Structures are given as C-alpha cells and as structure tokens.
Amino acid sequence: MPKKPLELLTESMFYVLMALTDGPKCGIDIGAFAEQRSRGAVRLGPATLYTILGKFEQENFIAETEVEGRRRTYRITQTGRRAYENELARLRRCLADAEGREP
Amino acid sequence: MVEQERIEQEKRRWIYRFPPCPWYDVEGVQSWLEEMAAEGFHLCKDGFWFGLVQFERGSPQQVRYRLQAAEKQVSMWNDDGGYPDDESRELTAEMGWQFVSSYGEFFIYRADSREAVELDTDPTVQALALEKVRGRQKSSVVSYALWFILYPLARLRFRWVSAWVSAGTPIFLGTVWLALSLFWSQTRTLVRLSRLKKRLEAGEPLTRRSDWRSRATRHHFMRVFDLALLLLWIVLLLRAWSVDILQEDRIALEEYQGDLPFVTLEEFLPELEPHFWQSDRDHTPYEERSTYNRYSNFLKDGSDPIAPRILYYTQSKRVTADGKELFDGYIRLEYTQMAFEFLAVRLEEEIYQNAADASYFSPLTCPPVEADSARMYSSIYPTLLIRRGRTVLQVQLRLERDGSPVPPEEWVPVFADFES
C-alpha cells in the first residue's frame, strides 16, 4: 500500500521544520526551540515530536546526521526546506489577505 | 511469625484487576488508570499481563496516564521486546513521561508532574500515529477472514451440510460462532480505531471520560460470556473425541433393539434346504460368522436438530457349509433424515462430491428405482446414493452368493425400498 504523503503542515510540523532550518538538532532541542521561538505558545509533546520526526524522515524532509546514545540528531533536506518555504509563503499570503494588502 | 507478616504485607502490596475497557478505548483506559492512581493503586511496570492488570498500593496521587500508538507491532518476540524504541523513551523521559507498560497496540506513559507538557499536543499528528495501528488492524481483519472463515470453508470445499451432520449441531455451531466472533472482534476494533482517527483528524483531542464505568459492565460481561462459550466448546469437542476414541456410541448388532428403516444383509441370505441341515449338522456342517468387531457389525443411532435421525450401520457376514462358501457380504450404510428437504438435497450432492474427489471413484449406471434422486458409483465397493423426500441413504455393498457377485439390478431395488 503506498504511503500517504503529507498534504498540509500542521503548526507543530511547521515549527519542527523551522527549528531544523536553524541547524541540525535532536528531538529535545527541537521542542525547546519551538517553545522559545513561539514565546511558549507552541509546546510540542514528546509523542507528537516523535511521530513528526518519524513521518518527516519517511517523507525525506529530514535526515539523521548523528546518533549519540539514545539521542538522534537531524538536519533538514532540500525537500524539507522546499516544503517549509511553501508553507511559509502560504502563511504569508493568508496574513496579507487578512490585512488586506498585496503579499 | 515475622516472615509470615512479611508475606502478608507483600500480598497486600499488589492488587490485580481485569481491564474494564478494550485496548482501543484510549480515553477509557486513561481515565480508569488515573482514577485507580487517585485511589492509591499505581500501575506496575509491565503491569498488563494475560488479560490481568497489576497495581501497587501506594498513596493516592493525581497523575496523568496517556496511551501512545505503537509505531511497530507490540510483541515480546520483536527485537525491541515490545518496548518503545530508544529515541521515543529518551524524548518522553526528558519531558517528564515514564513508560509503564503496553496494552494492545499502545504504549502507556505516566507523568507525575503537572508541569510536564502533554504527551500528544497535536491531534492531527496523533491521527498519523494511529494510522499505523489502524493499518496493522486492517491486515489483521484480512488474515482473520482468510484463516478463520475462508480457509476452513475452502478445506471443506464449501460442503458445510455434510460437515454439520458429521460434527453435530453443538460443535458445528460452536465452531462457526468462534470463527465469526474472532473475525467480528477484529472488525469491531478496526471500526473503533477508524472512528478515533476521524475524531483526531477533526482536531478533537482525547480527553478524560467519565462514562467508562457504564461500558465496563458490558465489557466484563462479554468477556465472561465469550470465555464460558469457549470452555463449553472445548468440553463438547473433548467429549465427542472421547466418544469416538472409546467407541461409546457403537451398539453391537445383536444387542440393538430398535427398528431399522432399511433392509440388511439378512434379506440376501440363502435359504438352506431342510435336508442340508439335517445331514450335516453333526460334523460342523454350517458356520455363520458375523461377530461384532472394530470395523463391522455395529451401528450408531443418533439424533441432531439438523438431522432428527442418523443411522450408521455396518455388517459383514460369511456363511460356509461343508467347506463351501455360500454367502459373503459386507455392507456400510448411512441413513440420514434431515430436518428439511432442501438440506437433504444439499447433503446428497455433497456426499456425491466427496466421493467423486477420491481417485478410485468411477460412476456406475443405477438401475431404475422410485426415488427423488438415485445415483450409483464405485468407491472401493459399488455404492448406491439415494434420496427420497428429506431422507438420504448411502449404501456401500459387497455381496457374493455361491462365489458370484450379486448384480445391482437385484440388490438396488431392495435397498431403495426404505422408510423415509
């Protein structure tokens, strides 16, 4: 059965990609980045983080760079960066529409 | 005395409960475990075992229990021993959640601190994780349908009436019930998982639910009911097996007192002339051998809701006089009176098909007889299969008189005249 591709990034997924555009990180650091960058508005639960990392790796959005004990570090791939930028552009359009200006 | 007290204390330390909800009832399981913890009973490490749950007594505590859909099938035979992988355990532990046990296809985590961020913060992502469990459940439904429904039917070549008659209604229906019940439980699980996934995809988080108690009674009742039926089925199976092994249902022909609705070998015995008896009586002139043994000269007289009368009759007889063989015959006869005519039609067809599967089968021409259906074939011996109304009679016969076989034209009309 073919795997179902991601159609839309959720807020949590978007923050995971955002964290990795900042540089390679492990799961804990990704969670900390999202919380800090959103000023506490986005808190990623461990099961959510784990599922997103698994799905992104499957979709080739991210790749594992290092394994240190139980901790795995990931970097964003070209595909992941494209998905992030597409989502960013979509959000910008939405924001511009809401504010009644050209994007 | 001190040792005894210690043992008593140890006994009181653990309590065991049956889970009140199935594993796919995520909210029910979470709510139950949290309520148990609030009463001072804390789920033990690997506490779900063989349908029982082990708790340790402690102080009442407000803790959170959450179920996480397992990425791979949970099995102690897996390389990971049925535990979450290292990365998952590392992440959850660092964020305040401890893995406690697995239940079905979910891992159970506990957070003692209120500060710990929720295990799942995005229902859409949680739905993605659940999809893996749902996918495995789909495969499970397909394999149950194959192994418990299609495969047994294919093995029987879809000849279910003859299987029903030979197994008897209680065992047959018990087996059908077991197969359907196993298949249904898998299907129901898939339906529940699909509903859960839809709720998550709609953005609805899984919250604490208070109605698990009302469902628990039904869940426990169904478990007890299923177990009782399973035990009953096993007992029936063992009983049938022991009757067959010990041959308890066999009655020697000379002991049978009932009326037979068909003719037997006696009908074909030669009539001996009086002078024959008189002249040779003194020096073992006449010998008739027809003793009950493991293979012949007994009958089984049974009844079943689907077939009110089932008679299995087997007889062998040999008559020699003064060294000369006068008569040698063997008969195996199955008389089945079905509850309904359509079942008899089906049974007759299935008996014929079963015989036709054998390599030594060959069709024979049946002499004309009065019946709804009559066929003849050779299956080791010449066999007559005849149906009148809702009664099916199968006669397998080897008959020699004065050293020559008795032709079917002679014996078929005699056997065809049975009570239906």
Image (cartoon, rainbow, N blue to C red):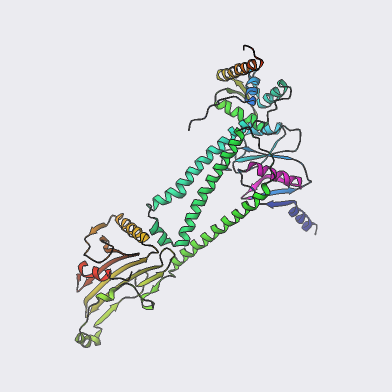
Classify A66 as above or below B259. above
Classify B148 as above or below B4. above
Is B188 on the left or on the right of B97, as rendered? left
Q: Residue furthest right?
A: B2
Which quadrant: the N terminus of chain B? bottom right
Q: Residue at x 22, y 71 (%)?
A: B400
Q: Residue at x 40, y 58 (%)?
A: B163
- Classify residue A9 by image quadrant: top right
- Classify residue B399 by image quadrant: bottom left
Camera-side residue of B45 and B207: B207
Residue bounds of the magenta highlight? B25-51
Classify B270 as above or below A54. below
Camera-side residue of B44 and B419: B419
Q: For residue B48: magenta?
A: yes
Q: For residue B410: magenta?
A: no
Residue B99: give x, y in percent of width and height. 67, 38
Which quadrant: the C terminus of chain B? bottom left
Classify B278 as above or below B127. below
Is B375 on the left or on the right of B182, as rendered? left
Q: Residue furthest top?
A: A102
Residue B125: give x, y in percent of width and height. 61, 31
Residue B107: give x, y in percent of width and height. 63, 39
Residue B164: give x, y in percent of width and height. 42, 59
Camera-side residue of B339 and B182: B339
